[in-house]
Image: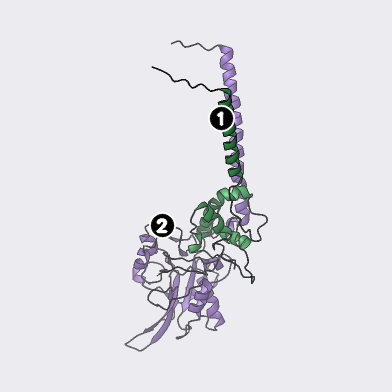
Chain colours: A green, B purple
Amino acid sequence: MRVKVINLDRTSIASLITLSLIFLLITGAAVADVVTPEVPMGRGAQCVEPIEIMRRDHFEFIKHQRDQTVYHGIRGSKHSLAGCIDCHASKGTEGEFLPINAEGQFCQTCHTYAAVKIDCFTCHATVPD
Amino acid sequence: MSCKPMKKDESVSLAQHRRTFFTQAAAGVSLMALAPGVRLVELAMANSEDSLPSNDKRWGLLVDTAKCESGCDECVSACNSEHGLSGHGRPETDAQWIRKVDLKDEQTGHELSIPILCQHCEDPPCVDVCPTGASFRRADGIVLVDKHTCIGCRYCMMACPFQARSFIHEDLTGQKTHSPRGKGTVESCTLCVHRIDEDQEPACVEACREAGHDALVFGDLEDAAGPLASLSSKTATRELRPDLKLNTGVRYTSF
């Protein structure tokens, strides 16, 4: 069996290194340029959990909370959906609350970005009382 | 292949290792257990054990038909505004949690006007037939629909002898925070469970009193000293369709 040996001289090694460096630079720049959604926070400054935990687990919290409310009548506790809306609903130009699931609003912005459909607001109120 | 015999000092050190490992693991486990423990304490503080629904109570309603006025629908409109029920002008399918029904004894000509709503049965047929467990009876006797698990099959609507349930056919907006409702689910009178949880009486009872009729008495059927049980023990009350032996929480008197 014949093995083809590629002889690389100094110039070609240098050009390969340069090329890979340029590639790294381009991809590195691309990572820094990832567009993340700009989420209107409403008046929410201090969330019920740290932001990183809320981003990852908010649905677990409200799913647990919903059974507490429906079956045990525990209302208005820390992880209630009504609490999310109270804090995160933004106001429009005339001071009226905008639905939290409207395009560009708190819930919908991230869910559009992540392409995850929210089903909460088929039934639940989208503005604070 | 050879198996190397273990020296005594080696086995001791291994046992020590094992012990250290288990001690550390146990410490880890106890730490992990501590975190959910903290959460449980928070929950218990947010709502004490006493306020959880229990079968020491059974919420019910007594309708005094002698006081219920024909043509008055204060209870119906109070219910509609409390829960944000708005129709589409199609009475056949529009949501209706209470309806006023006029009855006439054709032999004697005696007329009667009564509100009919979910009777909050002890043995509810809607709960029996629900394929997903969405229809349920809360520990304190209130029959509810968990709309998170309701698939909208409407078996419960067929099973209910009182036609007390409604199905939502169309997309809704502007729901009330305390009364989530949505397309594709079945709903009925919740006895204003959100108000009961805050020690208030249902909206219909309040409206009936404010209209000066006082035909609806709300209370705990198990509390002998309470308004409902004390009144029910003194007067003859009737269930609708007693033949079905549902032991309803809503009862009627004076007819």
Q: Which residue corresponds to the image point at 49% horizontal and 22% vertical from the top-left?
A: A6
Q: Secondary structure at mark 2?
A: loop
Instruction: Tell me the quadrant of the picture where the N terminus of chain B can be found.
Output: top left
Residue tagged 2: B133
Can you give x and y, in whole percent of width and height, for residue B40 in the image? 59, 49
- Looking at the image, can residue B236 be seen? no
Q: Secondary structure at mark 1?
A: helix
> Residue reaching furthest right?
A45
- What amino acid is labelled 1 in the image? Leu
- The disc numbered 2 marks a residue on which chain? B
Q: Nearer the viewer, mark 2 or mark 1?
A: 1
Between B208 and B225, the one lying in front of the other is: B208
Determine whether label 2 and label 1 are within 8 Å by CB.
no
Residue tagged 1: A16
Q: CA distance from mark 2 to mark 1?
A: 65 Å
Between A13 and A40, the one lying in front of the other is: A13
Can you give x and y, in whole percent of width and height, for residue B198 in the image? 59, 66
Between B139 and B76, the one lying in front of the other is: B76
Q: Is residue A28 left or right of residue B107?
A: right
Can you give x and y, in whole percent of width and height, for residue B19 in the image? 59, 25
Q: Which residue corresponds to the image point at 59% horizontal and 61% vertical from the top-left?
A: A85
